[in-house]
Image: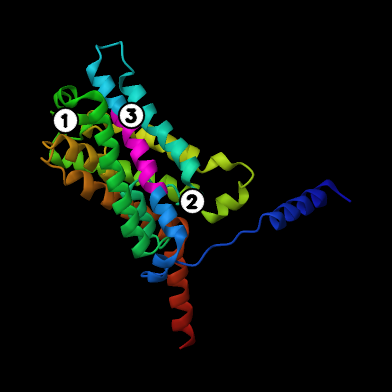
Amino acid sequence: MSKEVEIDEAAAAGEKKVPYWDPPPAPLLDTSELKKWSLYRALIAEFVATLIFLYVSIAAVIGYKSQAACTGVGTLGVAWSFGATIFVLVYCTGGVSGGHINPAVTFGLFVGRKLSLVRAVLYIVAQCLGGICGAGIVKGITGNVLYDTLKGGTNSVSDGFSVGAGLAAEIVGTFILVYVVFSATDPKRTARDSFIPVLVPLPIGFAVFVVHLATIPITGTGINPGRSLGPAIMYGGAWKNHWIFWVGPLIGATAAALYHKLVLRGEAVKALGSFRSTSATV
């Protein structure tokens, strides 16, 4: 038997061990989920994970702003705090809720038909509540004076940048994040790389990290409406242009979902091919 044949048989055996299965689109409105404990367990996981994420990340931002130059974690450290925390939390909650920890990610997965409208809405509510509680814990620990002086780690368009630039940065940053989420959780990839469990949360955490490096100077980096909402409510004075941190991420998430679904997975070409073959037989 030649080496080529042995390699082909080994590859075939490997494919049989880890079969590829593409799940069907999630139902648009599945009220039966409301009767399942798995949904409420997932909501609790999303709430707690977002709370932890806001506590760690906003505390890092407050600490960075309160320390003298060259003595704190710096912009690089803030970016690492966001990215590393997401990596850890996605790893911990991925098997329970999917580890979204971000209303924009949830919305993007809804657009991609990965979850129902009921689950998407409840996830977003849980994430926003978790973000508010996480920011509240930071405010309670740091004290009102320091928290308010440093604006509570809220997002805003930096001086020198226009509102349009801030919106564009949020759109592009969220597109990158949600694009990585779709790629990392693609059934083909997870079937092939199932023996390395960290390959899903790791690129997602790195995506958050690199996006923060790029957009901290522009908007402080939102790309997560829950992260922007929590500090805004706790601080109470950061509502100017707050809509950017909702509209931008939702547009970016939608674009990423459609790009992955229609282009990378080729559903647009498949639909066009099916239409042409049907027309030819009529």
User: Mark 3 — residue?
Assistant: 213
Q: Nearer the viewer, residue 64 or 207?
A: 64
Q: Pointer 3: residues within 10 angstroms few (<14), some, or many (20+)?
A: some
Query: Whole-percent x and y of residue 152?
Result: 20, 30
Answer whether labels 3 and 1 touch (C-beta < 8 Å). no
Query: Whole-percent x and y of residue 40?
Result: 41, 57
Asked if residue 1 is positioned above or below residue 131 in the image, the reply reads: below
Mark 3 or mark 2, whichever is nearer to me: 2
Q: Pointer 2: residues within 10 angstroms few (<14), some, or many (20+)?
A: some
Q: Pointer 1: residues within 10 angstroms few (<14), some, or many (20+)?
A: some
In this picture the colour scheme is: rainbow
Span shown in magenta: 45-58
State the SS at label 1.
Answer: loop
Distance Cα–Cα, label 3 vs label 1: 15 Å
User: Mark 1 — residue?
Assistant: 158
**Number of numbered callouts drawn:** 3
- Looking at the rendered structure, the kind of residue marked 3 is Leu
Residue at the (46%, 51%) spot, across then down: 98
Asked if residue 13 is positioned above or below residue 101 in the image, the reply reads: below
Q: Is 51 a magenta residue?
A: yes
Say which label, 3 or 1, has the lower sequence index: 1
Query: Whole-percent x and y of residue 218?
Result: 22, 32
Q: Of all residues shown, which one is farthest toward the bottom?
A: 282
| Left or right: residue 66 compared with residue 4 | left
User: Mark 2 — residue?
Assistant: 96
Instruction: Considering the whole magenta stretch, tell me its main secondary structure.
Output: helix
Q: Can residue 223 be seen in this view?
A: no
- Looking at the rendered structure, the kind of residue marked 1 is Ser
Distance Cα–Cα, label 1 vs label 2: 37 Å
- Looking at the rendered structure, the kind of residue marked 2 is Val
